[in-house]
Amino acid sequence: MQFLQQSFAVSFDYKVFFTTAVFSRDNTLIADFFKELGPDISSRKLLFVIDEGVEKAHPDLLESIKDYFAVHSGPQLVDHFIIVKGGEETKNNDTQLNKILEATNKYGIDRHSYLAAIGGGAVLDMAGYAAAIAHRGVKLIRIPTTVLSQNDSGVGVKNSINHFNKKNFLGTFRPPVAVFNDDLFLHTLDDRNWRAGISEAVKVALIKDAPFFLWIQEHAAALNRRDSAAMEKLIFECARLHMEHIAGADPFESGSSRPLDFGHWSAHKMEQLTRYELLHGEAVAIGIALDTIYSFLVDYLPEADMLQVVRLLLDLGFELEHPVLAQTNSLLTGLHEFSEHLGGRLTIMLLEGIGKGIDVHDIDQEKFIQAVHMLKTLTKKEM
Amino acid sequence: MQFLQQSFAVSFDYKVFFTTAVFSRDNTLIADFFKELGPDISSRKLLFVIDEGVEKAHPDLLESIKDYFAVHSGPQLVDHFIIVKGGEETKNNDTQLNKILEATNKYGIDRHSYLAAIGGGAVLDMAGYAAAIAHRGVKLIRIPTTVLSQNDSGVGVKNSINHFNKKNFLGTFRPPVAVFNDDLFLHTLDDRNWRAGISEAVKVALIKDAPFFLWIQEHAAALNRRDSAAMEKLIFECARLHMEHIAGADPFESGSSRPLDFGHWSAHKMEQLTRYELLHGEAVAIGIALDTIYSFLVDYLPEADMLQVVRLLLDLGFELEHPVLAQTNSLLTGLHEFSEHLGGRLTIMLLEGIGKGIDVHDIDQEKFIQAVHMLKTLTKKEM
């Protein structure tokens, strides 16, 4: 048998910066990032894609960006901003995607040029997908504007749009070249979006870092009253844990284990069943509660730990009761869809302690329904 | 300044197998490939996408595949074959792409399942792109059926479709999990397709391997009379040189240098100007001749070497005269488009000897037009 063996590795490196007012003239962070790339940068182009909601909440944003690149040297700013719809809607068909692809063609954004996306997780997913497929990949800069995108999706390696009515059916694994987390964008979030992203921090603390869980408990009140310092710390730690996980294990998810999806299998289904009326982070909070109670019901997790988790989610202001929870059969079909999207053997993370996850390959449907009922009881009792 | 540094590497490994009659019962190559993946393979699925032209030329193919997977254990064969149009047409809009995406959805092809594409370079490009974006990537097996795809595009890491009337505008870098080069498919190629792929071997010999160039000279007559042994050797060496280049330098082409595109900038434009009436390999043969003559005209390459190259291309039966060569201005716009698709600084490979390429960053338009005229003269004289 004759064959040729191909073997190579591709390195990916990027920084996630934390800053305030990234486009104010005297903030040289982005200018310095480009300067480090050498003199060739002046021949590159830079196209901005901006979430419509962010533009409305920050009416000076476009002018600030123009002003910034007029003052600082760097790539050539494309003098036209691509404004796209925000929220999950932006991923539901290819209208917004095509808008970006047309702009990359029209303005000659090539593989050495930059697409900078400013927005929430959905816009970053969709714009990142456009950047991944245009010319087999133009350089992507992410500027996430929500808690959820700053601490989770925006710092990772995935992009996608929905297709065939399935979440993230089309997409690629492709890291950005840089991420700029600007806390100024958080100030204009409504309370729901401020809170929603906190659930991903609870999630990653539960599976990986008990001291961080304790820290969140201690700062629940501060987070609730929108304390900036507490939120910045929460985002930093959560982003760090997510990034460490991605680098350490299986960046492009070739295996079946996805610990970062703790609490997510039912969450994805709840989002879909509520037509995305539930925000991703809100659904994840309910999903965490369910999988935590389930972990207790199958004797992995002590009752006291389980109660602490539910208590914290309630203290953070999450609604753990929702009409969608009555559709237990529909929720359980989410198990199958989750498994199909990932492929391979069903692998669900449960808890065997706070800060300690465990992979299982089967969910007992009766016990899951029991968990739904127990959540209802606990929520009533605790509130 | 606060930041988190992300750094990781992703390894890619695959084999390119050389075999005869890959789906005959007693050829265990594919069965062995799957067996090595362990017992889990029986829970995976396998979907075939087949080039319409290949199916017509091999009327027993579908039955052979069914028979093969009935006899050998392995993944679950999807009992429906996706037949797609062949040739560049398959890449010109998303009709064929959508056909494949719909099948991956309908038959539940997940990230651990396999899409096997059988066909020429265009079908492999298009089906590979579908595999790259469905569920952020399902596993791709390539079974190339033309000289060009067996020795060049099919063994590499790229996929794409055309968009905005631009070749390969959409695509990704994503390696297959295996490639099976079956020489049986070559026997049914028409003379044009048999010959066309040889130009990529001449190209890679010219920039990397003088002894291989000599070997091609010595076997030009055998290749012309469709000698199988000569063609197998040519394909193996050409695939080896392409694969070594990909692994050694810059697999996902983050830089500006693309030596494997020697002779290609004008070839891409000639394909487009002739509406793909010229096959890729035929256009590359003319492109090689032009860039070789140009290399002589700018004093990089000795005249004797230049004459050897033109002589060999003619000996191999390539037509180096074509009406499209009259459109020199249109050809020269290809320089700009080539540079835009790659991005960054214009980088064109020329020759400074047989087996020795050199990057230049500028093409003298007058000298290029002179090269076109000289090619005409030489072709007349030599033929």
Image (cartoon, coloured by chain):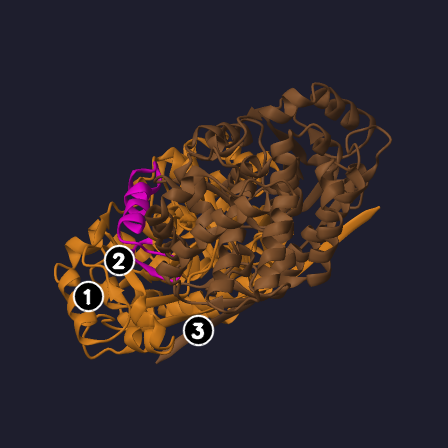
Chain colours: A orange, B brown
Q: Amino acid at mark 2?
A: Phe
Q: Position of residue A185 (x, y in %)?
A: 24, 63
* Residue B181 highlighted magenta (yes or no): no
Q: Amino acid at mark 1?
A: Ile
Cβ atoms under marks 3 and 2 closer than 8 Å: no
Whole-number angstrom distance, CA of label 1 to CA of label 2: 9 Å
Q: Which residue is mark 2?
A: A48
**Left or right position of B267 against A28:** right
Q: Which residue is mark 3?
A: B4
Of callouts 1 and 2, the N-terminal one: 2
Of all chains, the one bearing label 2 is A
Whole-number angstrom distance, CA of label 3 to CA of label 2: 23 Å
Residue located at (51% from left, 58% from top): B293
- For the view shown, which residue lies furthest in the right direction? B26
Q: Position of residue A182 (x, y in %)?
A: 28, 68
Q: Which sits in the foreground, A60 or B210?
A: B210
**Left or right position of A378 against A369:** left
Q: Secondary structure at mark 2?
A: strand
Q: Which mark is residue A65?
A: 1
Of all chains, the one bearing label 3 is B
Whole-number angstrom distance, CA of label 1 to CA of label 3: 24 Å
Work out whether disc 1 and disc 2 sit on a shared chain. Answer: yes
